[in-house]
Every structure is written in structure tokens, then in C-alpha cells.
Image: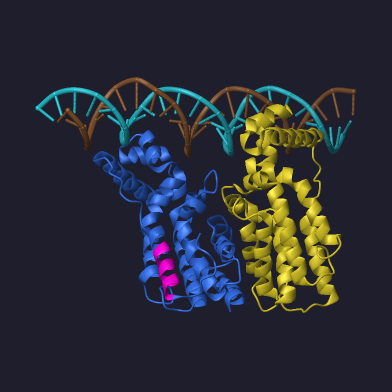
Chain colours: A yellow, B blue, C brown, D cyan
Amino acid sequence: MDDVNGPQSGSASDNDHDELLRLAAPAPPTATRADAARNRAKILDAAERLFAEHGVGAVSMDAVATAAGVGKGTLFRRFGDRSGLAVAVLDARESVLQAAILGGPPPLGPGAPPADRLRAFLAAYAEFLDTHLDLVRVSETASAGARYRIGAYRFWHRHVAIQIRAARPDLDHEYLAHALLAPLGGDLRAALRDEYPWRRTVDALDSLVTALLG
Amino acid sequence: MDDVNGPQSGSASDNDHDELLRLAAPAPPTATRADAARNRAKILDAAERLFAEHGVGAVSMDAVATAAGVGKGTLFRRFGDRSGLAVAVLDARESVLQAAILGGPPPLGPGAPPADRLRAFLAAYAEFLDTHLDLVRVSETASAGARYRIGAYRFWHRHVAIQIRAARPDLDHEYLAHALLAPLGGDLRAALRDEYPWRRTVDALDSLVTALLG
DNA sequence: CGGTTAATCGGACTACAGTCCAGTTACGAT
DNA sequence: ATCGTAACTGGACTGTAGTCCGATTAACCG
């Protein structure tokens, strides 16, 4: 297991970066049949269009399948369930933020102190969340907390955990990363959006990070 | 609105206590028809029995209605939806913890320093959560983040916010209370239960509280 | 280029949450 | 005691997520 000790050597930092990269990279394109790939693209197109036009909540899976010119079985075979489809649609948009974290300018990208990077990330993620709230909520709706198993969440979690560890190696950075991400879950944000606008949310989370990492 | 200033005067503390009491008290029993009350009890009995026997996830609303000897319309009229039923079933069990907070011995009850009370509460709630996880998850499953509107959550939130304010009046205690409760949401806990047992969860949250309140 | 195989396709099917409304029943007024 | 009415009841109905399996078709090999 990637142990907790090993202070900030250059190579440890590189390992962290590599691990994040692996989480960000899409699964290796395992020899898919041509028609399957075509259908996948048609479905994503149709879903994106319908979601934009009618709102995520008002689009049934049947509607997506029909609009894509594809049977229902195909839709569910390729994406598992409704939340899987949402994840796939979100994927492209998440990549932008992931790229900024991996190689963008500080404080979001590498180079800034951990506490600053963490604050910058939480602010950026909060913005992402508000922009795609409906889609994120659907992607979280799953039988057994699917959100926490998919690549995107694991990327955010890893990034946050690494920043915490860098500033406070004595803490349980793995769990605390979950705890810091939890307030940015879709349901809570949807319930609190009116009462707590983006600015107030970010300020409060900043104060939490400051208390934790100094 | 109940303003943020007003330091820890005795009366402010009493106001806090009264506000909590109000959130804990069940809605005034507005002249219910006798048969309605009887059916409500029959439904709760049946639900509790079926949940215990087959697991929460394997019990359909039809099954509850049938077992209670009641029509489906009645079930939905009285409890709104599936999550409303779960809330009602949980209600009695939550009251125990609420009573301990309002009038039990410290550190859970009044008398201990805010940071201690907060830690004690988070530990107690984490235990409650693990005991009733399935039911809590159903109670959170709702169209528009219903969890955050119901009395039980508002009680927990109020309590946490009050403790934060008492120790750190400079912070946004309202939002931070949500942030501290968020890690104890049902979905996250379900996903993390295996990897992070109760002890580790509580320890990590303790360190978070310590960082925040000292 | 034709045959073999295994993955894919797609629409009929199931199960369940939640709605609706016509009939019924309890309660207050007379 | 009787009546009027508002609230309650319950089962038929709707819409949707997700499953299943026979028919289809792409990829690979000789």
C-alpha cells in the first residue's frame, strides 16, 4: 500500500502525480465493435441534446433510446443505469477541471502550497457543481453509493487527500478527504443552494481548510 | 432573525435550548379521525415488522399496505412517499438521542464545553447511523433533498451550529454545521462503512472538530 | 470470400412508486 | 337523533427504470 510516511521527497510527489493521472485516464479502449462505438456516441449525443432541451429530470431513458435510434437494451447494456449515463455525459466536462489540476497554473495546478491548492480546488469544484447540479445529482443516484466508486470521485478524493497529507501528515487524510468532499454532494448542495450562494459556501469551506491545514 | 452576535448570556443559552425543544416536539396532534390514527399505527407496525424480517430494500410499498390491511392510497396519503414512511419509522428511535442531547448527562447533554459536546454528538450520531443505515438511506432518498427539510435533520443541524457558535462566533456556524453533518450522510457512510469502521470515522471527525474548535 | 463464433441489438416484459377519484365514513351542527 | 359535509379510504391506473432472450451482425480465420 502507498504508505503514509515518506515525507515530501521529489519522487513521492511524482508518484502522487502519476496516480492522479491514472485515475484521470479513460479506460483503455478494449477492442470495441464498430457499431457499438457508433451507438455509444449516438446515445451520448442524444442524451446531451435532450438534457439541454427539456432538463435532466424530464428525460426518460426510453426517450434517450428513441432519440438515439437505439433499443432500450442497448442503452442499459452500455451504461448500466440512469446514473451511469449521467456519469458518461459529465465525463468530458470533468476532464477540463482534472487537466487544470494536473497541469494548469497554480494555485489550482501544481506549485502552490497545499492549503492554497485545496482551497482553489474546492472553489472550482463548487462552481462545477453549481453548473451541472442536475446531472451530478442523477449521477449520484444509485443503488449502492455508486458515486464513490467511479473514477471522477476517486480523482477528487485522491487530490484532496494528497494535499491534506502534505500539510498535516499526522491526520487521517484518507477519511478527511471524504469529509471535505461530502459538503459538495449533489443533494446537500441542491437543498442549500438558495440559502448559501457560491460565495458563502466557498468562504465557509475556506475557513474549514484554514482551521485544518493552517 | 436570531442574530449571530449576543455572546453566551444565560438567556441566549435558554433560547437555544427552547429552539431545540421546538424542533424535537412532534407536530401538535391536529384532531385526527379515529380510524385514521388506527390505520397510521397499523401501517407503522407492519412496516417495522416487514423491514426487520426482509430488509428495508426488499419491502415494496404494496407489501406494506397489504400487510397493514390498508389500501395503497391510504399509505401514500398519510406518509407522502417511501422516504416519508422511513422517516416516521425512524422517528421514535431518533427521539432517544434527542432527549439525551436536551437533558441527558454531559458531554452529550448540557454542561460540557462545546467542542466536547460536539464530539460526543458526532460519535453518538455515527452509531445511530450505523444501526439504522438502510432506513436512513431510504429516508434521504427524495425528489428534492427532503432530508434537509424534515425536523430530525434540522434538530441535528441546530445543535451542531449552536456548539460551533459557542466556541467560534467568528465562523459561519450555520454552513459549517451542514458541512460537519455531511460526512454522516447515508450514502457516503454506506460506501465507506467497510473501509472505515466506526472508530476510525469518529477519530477522524474528532480531529476535524479539534482543528475547528480547538 | 464464405463459415463460425461470440458479442451486440432491440423490443416485449416485469415490478414498483406514485396518482386519481368515486364511494364511504366519522364528526359537528341543528 | 338526523343531516350535511369534509376528510378519509382503497384499488384501479399510469409512467418509468431496469431485465431478458431470440434475432442479428461484426470480427476473425482458413
The secondary structure that dominates the magenta segment is helix
Q: Is residue B190 above or below residue A87?
A: below
- Residue A94, horizontal then vertical, whole percent: 76, 51
Residue B158 visible from this viewpoint = yes
Where is residue B104 shown, x and y percent of the image? Answer: 36, 72
> Of B102 and B170, which appears nearest the observer?
B170
Q: Position of residue B82 (x, y in %)?
A: 45, 43
Q: Residue at the spot x=45%, y=63% of the render? A: B128
Specify whether residue B193 is in view: no
> Which quadrant: the C terminus of chain A?
bottom right
Residue B14 falls inside the magenta stretch:
yes
**Residue for point 48% across, 63% down:** B158
Q: Is residue B78 left or right of residue D3?
A: right
B98 relative position to D5: left or right: right
Residue B200 figure quarter: bottom right
Position of residue C30 relative to residue B34, above or below, is above
| Residue stretch in magenta | B10-19
User: Looking at the rendering, which quadrant does residue B58 occupy?
Assistant: top left
* Residue visible at 81% across and 60% down in the picture: A101
Q: Where is residue A206 in the image (x, y as percent from the top left)?
A: 69, 66
Magenta-colored stretch includes residue B5: no
Which residue is pictured at 84% across the width and 66% down the height? A110
D5 above or below B114?
above
| Quadrant position of residue A200 | bottom right
